[in-house]
Amino acid sequence: MDVEFPRLGNTNNSWTDYLITRRLGVQSRAAAPPYFVDVHWWPPVNHWMKVNTDGSALGAPGSISAGGGGVFRDKWAAVRGCFHVKGGLGFAFEAELLAVITAINIAHSRGWRFLWVESDSSYVVNLLNSRSEDVPWRFVASWKSALRILPEFNIMVTHIYREGNSPVDIMANGERTEGWWPYPIDEIKKAVALDMATHSHTRMVK
């Protein structure tokens, strides 16, 4: 009688894994090896404004004040403004959402109608691209308000890995004072300059 052995998931490509699975008669498949990608921060073109956003929540989920931040830059990569906003007790993805809502409202109030939004949150990118209203209840009103003004923009939304989002990571720090600054604050100047000096960061993707 033929016996069909079960198939398991990926192994870790180790010799020990190979010997164990062989002895047990279990068929396995090797995990794909990790690879490296270059992560670039690109400035916008012509009259477009680019805003990178980020959110953070330090400590146990829901027990520490979450914060979001953003940095606006023009085609010369010059910082036209940066902000930090408090999210109250919550999760990092809620802070990410609050950051992009704040960025849209700031851009609207300043007349920046050609807007490139970039985030390291796939959650935020998917929400914006789909115009989904499926958000946590406490953000429903502010999110719908942001969606209502989106038709007034020419807007592009992209994802970037965290390695290319370092100036905004600094702005999202939950311990920062809430506010809007129409210039680059001292803490982000080095990170902004590094974006344009190296123009590339490396990330390992598994």
Image (cartoon, grey):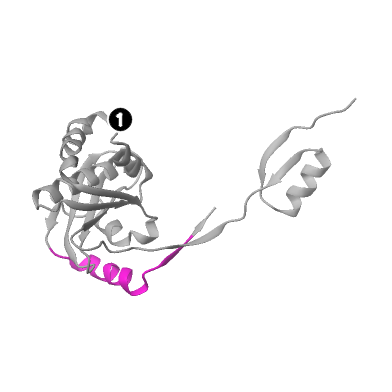
Q: Give x and y (percent) for residue 83.
A: 17, 54
Going by the image, does 99 lie left or right of 197? left
Count of marks placed on residues: 1
Is residue 188 located in the magenta-colored stretch of the structure?
Answer: yes
Q: Kindly indicate the quadrant of the structure image that contains residue 150.
A: top left
Could you tell me which residue is drawn at 32 percent across and 43 percent down? 124
Q: Give x and y (percent) for residue 114.
A: 19, 53
Q: Residue placed farthest to the top in the image?
A: 1
Location of mark 1 (residue): 134
Q: What element carries label 1?
A: loop
- Above or below, 168 against 86 in this view is below
- Above or below, 100 against 203 in this view is above
Is residue 113 located in the magenta-colored stretch of the structure?
Answer: no
In the depicted view, which residue is nearer to us: 117 or 174? 117
Q: Residue placed farthest to the right in the image?
A: 1
Instruction: Give the amino acid at mark 1.
Output: Asp
Q: Give x and y (percent) for residue 93.
A: 32, 41
Could you tell me which residue is drawn at 14 percent across and 64 percent down? 183
In the depicted view, which residue is nearer to us: 195 or 89? 195
Could you tell me which residue is drawn at 90 percent across and 25 percent down? 1
The crowding category of the residue bearing disc 1, from other C-alpha atoms within 10 Å (few below 14, some 14 to 19, many at least 20), is few
Question: Is most of the magenta stretch helix, strand or loop?
Answer: helix
Residue 102 appears in the rendering? yes
The segment highlighted magenta reads 183-203
